[in-house]
Every structure is written in structure tokens, then in C-alpha cells.
Image: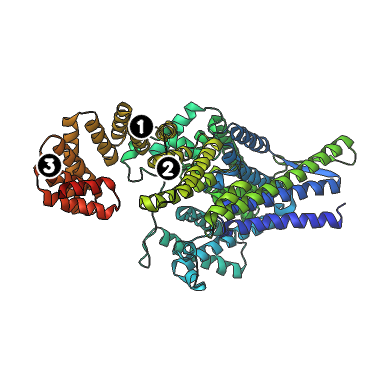
Amino acid sequence: MPDKITDKLEKVIAALLKGTVFLLPLFFLPWTAEFFEFNKQFLLWLVMPLALFLWLFKTIRQKQLKIKTNILNLPILLFLLLAAASAVFSLDRFSSFFGYYGRFSDAWLGLLSLVIFYFLLINTGVADSAKKIYDLLKLFIYSALAAAAVSFSARVGFLKLLSVEAPNWLSSPWFNPAGGSLYSLGIFLTTAAAAVVGLFLTGKLKKSERYIFGGGLILIVIVLVSVNSSWLGLKPPQEAILDYSPALAIAKQALKASPFLGSGPGTFAYDFSLYRPAELNQNPLWQVRFDKSASQILELPATYGLLGLLGYFLIASLIIYLNVKLLIKHGRAWRTEGKSGDYNLAITLFSVFLWLFLCQIFFQTNTVLNFSGWLFLGLLVAFWQTRDAVVFKEKIISLAENLKWRKFWLLVLFLAAAGWFALAVYEIKFFAADVLAARGADREAGLAAAGKLNPKRHNYEISLAKFYLNRLKIEARQPKDKRDGSYLKANIASAIDQGRQAAWLTPNSVAAWETLGMIYRDASPLTFNSEPWAVESFSRALALEPTNPVLATELAKAYFNNDDAVNAEKYFKRASELKPDYYEAKFGLAKVYLKNQKDKLAFDLLNQLAAATFDPEIFYELGRYYYNHGQIDKAVERFKLVLTVSPNHANGLYSLGIAYEVKGETAEALKYYRQVLELNPGNQEVINKIKSLKQ
């Protein structure tokens, strides 16, 4: 018999589940670097394991274990285990378990939390009757209407008026709490609209609810229209979304590389870098590193492998088959007996589930959409559990009579408590780390503290390395006599240390190796023998993203600076092949041609670039070409073109001085040398030039 404590536990579990249904679409916190997905996942990771622990404690208290059995249980458990195996063998294990930074919705812990939510939904009293299912459905709709109201308020400027000092993201007319993405908001609100229509068809709404949901439906339509068109003079921001064709090509290549378990949950960014088609270099978004595929279904084979994809489709196929079969079995009888409300509820739940499944085929998902899918899966199963005892059964194990089961269940309870506590400690540490990393008051201290609290998240090391690199660049711009040598050395050492640590933490991260290469590249004028390390770092980065023309160009520049003209030419050509209109690669190739004394090739390429781009550096190189070939007048013309674009171009001014000196026009030469000296006070070479010309 249930006692008061058991009843209270049941109520607490129900409150946690209902609270999550309502709160999750609206939940965000402004203190972290990413406001939405990270915090929604954080909520799931804390609440769902806690609810499971309370359920386990309740079963011990009752001395009785009740499990609802159906043909979905095993496939769902199998899918969860396959995802765990994929995460263990992932290209980035930490990101697979805790989410790729900035896109946390694919974390295995998130999937585990959703499976727990589904399990509790069908094994507790929160959805064990049609009335309770209606209540949960209404709660979901109320949450969606609140999200629509917040989005509408942002659109018309109400949110901005709420606070004079509103942060930029809150004062944006496109703010929405359901995940940041406008098209995801559109899918979520369309899902809610379908649920509202279904509730109207059931005829189970009170008069006040009909008014509320009717008005809410109008609000949803207004918000959807505003998302998909210019409204009130506002143009919706364009979201960077990968096209289907390259997404399919990447999925095929990733599947070939790791056919069974994929690259790991949440690691599509790594797959994108490794297998991005070269054709993307002609796309306006060619410099974007996509961390999500074009759709959830196209992402699954890459990240979960063939086994995960089959497991996912097995679950979807079984629930579709079950619903079709049960609707045929019960539908006619319900209509005959006047139970159209039950039939319409089943149709509503099934239709919304199908809509969410189709959305996963054609669109990306986020935490709210994933949660919505598992919610409606759970509501469907909970509904049929109350209607068909033949397909959906209940297994009861007495823990009082079976001592072995009781001991086993106590062990499970202990492990669940220890696991939840350990997970909660880690989650709080990770949350605190991101709060510290996001603060702007003391960037260095915040990132350093974040790295200590969460030493597995290489993004903090990358950010800190870039912070030191930026300080290095600022100091390096100072005149030589005003530079602080010890400060420069300290920042170079710190930047290299953080860059190496990031690359060590996640050796498959192209961003980590690219950052390290940038550090060695920018530090080369201030240090000794850093060019080989720049070559090594950019080589590793290019190996991880072989069709990126920028990385090929940077590697070529590193070889060029390391006096390896052969490899420099090779990689400049490779970059030009990857992106024929890439200026940096062609200009670098022209300079290599000049160094390799392939003057005709260099001259033709420089003139080709000069016709397409009015860049002072091109004219400067053309001036050098003419000077080296004894055509001084043409060289002077090109050097003067440099100054029309960049009047303080020191090399252009100095070269003009030399050219006029060769021509014997001393006054003109002195004029340009003096201008160089004004830009670089104390330059001994220029001072000597001026003295020699005055004699």
C-alpha cells in the first residue's frame, strides 16, 4: 500500500516532469557564452537523473518494481547503448558526451536524459490517463505560446523597452527563447499549432481554453509570418545552413571511414572539415565551418554510423507501425461507441510525432525539438498503454519476496545516487567554467579559471591563446624602441603554451592546429626558428581540412618564410586549384615565381591580379619586377600607384627613393627617404641613405 512518503515522491517526480515540459522551451540564462542550448542541456542533465533517482527510491519504498513493457523498450535501450559506444570511440570523446561547444544538443548525456524522461513518462502516474495526457499536451502548448509571446514582444520592441540597459541579444528584434535559431522556432511553433488544432478537434477544451488557444493560434501565425518575411521594416537574419548536396556527400565519406559507429555524437564539425567537398569553395558561405548537417537524418550516419542510423529508424518504424495497427484495431469501434475524443487524441499525438519525425529528415534539430519528439513519443506510448493491455503490458516484481532483486535494486539505487551526485558536481563545474569564460571584465583571468574548472574543453585554451596572440600583435605594432621585450616574450610563450595544450587535448580539432599555426606565424619576426613549427601546425590543420584553400595558402606562406620555395609553390598551386578566384593564393604564387626566377609566369599573374583587384601590394610587386629588369620608369609608375592607394606604404616610399636615386634624381630620392624616416624614426639604414645623398 502506498504511504505518504511514496505519494509525495510521486508528486515530486510528476512536478519535475511537468516543470520540464513547460520550462525547457523557455529556459535560458544570460551568463554563459551560449545562452540557450547549453543551459537547456544543463537543466535536463540535472533534473532527469534526479527524477530517476527518486523513482528508484520510490520502488524501494514500495517494495515493488513495476515496469511497463512494449516492443519499443529494447530498441530504445539498444540505440542508447550504441550511441554510448560511438561516444567512447569518438574523434572527440568529451564533446560526444557533453556536447560540441556552441552546439550542445547532440551530447550523449542529453540523449540519456531524454530516454530517462520517456521512461518516467510511461512508468509513472504522470500520464496514466487521457485526462493527464491532455494536461501535459496543454502544458506543452502553453509553453509554446509563451515562447511565441516573447518572440513577438522582441519583434515589436517590447523587450527592449523593459530595460534601458538591455544587452544586445535581448534587445534584438529576432530574440526567441526556444533556441536562438529562427527556423527552429518556426518548426517548434508549427508543432504547437498542430497540437492546438488537434485539441480543438477532440472537443475536450473548456470555453476559456478555446479562447486562449484560439488567440494563441493567431499569435503563432503572426510570429511565423514575421519569421519568414520582412515585417515592420525588419529583415530576418540569414542563418548559415549547410546545403543538402554537400551534407549527403560528407555523410557518405564519413560512413566509409567509420561505417559502424561513426565519428561520435556531436562531432559533425570534424566530419565536415575532413570531407567537405571542394565545390563548397565557390559558395558564398565557403569560409563557414558547419557544425551541423543539413538535417538530423543526414547527420546520423556520419556521427552515429550505420548501426545508430538503423537503430533510430527501427524506433521510428516501430512506433509508426504500432500506431497504424492500433488505430485500425480500435478506431472503428471508438467511432461506433461515440468515443471520438479518444480517436482524435490518438490522431493528434500521432500526427504531431510524424511531423517532428519528418522535420528531422529535412531540417536540423536542437534541444527543444529533440525534447518535443521524445515527449510525443512518450505520450503516444502512454496513451496506448491505457487502451490496449494486450500489446502494452506491466511486469511486477516483488522486492519484499525476492531478496536478490531487492539487493540488486538497492545497488542500482546507490549507483544512481553516486552517479547523479558526481554528474551534478561536474555539471556545476562546467557551468561555472563557461560563466567565467564569458565574462568580459577580466578576459585572461576568466579563461584561465575556466580552463582549470573544465580542463577537457579545448575551446578555452584556444580562446586564451588568441587572447595572448592579440596582445602580442598590439605590442608588436609599437616602434622598436618603445616595445617591451619581456612583455613580448611572455605573451609569445603563453600563446604557444595554450595553443599546444589545445592541440594536445583535441588532436583532431582543425581549429586548435590552425590557431597554433597562426601563433608561430605571427611570432616569427620576433622569435628565432618558429617557421618550422608554423609549417608543422598548418600541415596538421590542412590534413584535418584538406579542401580548405585558406589553410593551403597559410601552409604555403609558412614554407615560403622557411625558405622552402618548392613546397611553397606546391601549396599555393593547390590553394588556387581548390578556389580559382582566391586572391591570396594567386598573389603568393606570384611572389614564389619571382623568388624562383620564373619571371614571365610571375609577371603574367601579377598583371592578371592587377586587372581584377586594386591592391597596393600587387603594384608594389610589379614595381619590383620592373626595377629588377632595369625598367626604372615603369617601376616608378607602379610604386606611385601604391601610394595612391596607401600613402604611408613604407616599402613603396623606400622603393621610390631607391628608383629615383638610380635615375640620379637626388632631390626626389631624398623626399621619399625623409617620408620613410617620418614613419620609422631611428631607422639607421634610411638615415645613412639620406646622409650619403646630401654629401
Front residue of 458/103: it is 458
Q: Disc 1, disc 3: CB below 8 Å?
A: no
345 lies left or right of 407: left
Residue beneath disc 1? 562
Q: Is residue 332 at least partly visible in the picture?
A: no
Distance from disc 2 to disc 3, alpha carbons, whole Å, reads: 51 Å
Q: Which residue is drawn at 36% across and 45% down?
A: 285
Residue 384 x/y as whole percent: 67, 46
Image point (74%, 54%), residue name? 13
Q: What residue type is labelled 1?
A: Asn
Q: What element carries label 3?
A: helix
Residue 362 image point, x, y percent: 45, 44
Q: Which amino acid does label 2 sit on?
A: Arg
Marking on residue 252: none
Contact between labelled residues 3 and 2, with CB atoms less than 8 Å apart: no
**Which quadrant would residue 31 be assigned to in this image?**
bottom right
Q: Which of marks 1 and 3 is nearer the N terminus?
A: 1
Q: Nearer the viewer, mark 2 or mark 3?
A: 3
Q: Nearer the viewer, residue 4 or 236?
A: 236
Q: Nearest the camera: 404 or 154?
A: 154
Query: Residue at label 3?
Result: 662
How far, Cα to Cα, is label 2 from label 1?
A: 29 Å
Residue at the spot 50% in from the left edge and 48% down from the top edge = 463
N-term mark: 2 or 3: 2
Q: Distance between the residues labelled 1 and 3?
A: 31 Å
Asked if 483 appears above or below 244 in the picture, the reply is below
Q: Name the residue under label 2.
A: 289
Front position among marks 1 and 3: 3
Residue 30, percent across and down?
A: 56, 60
Tell me the SS state at disc 2.
loop
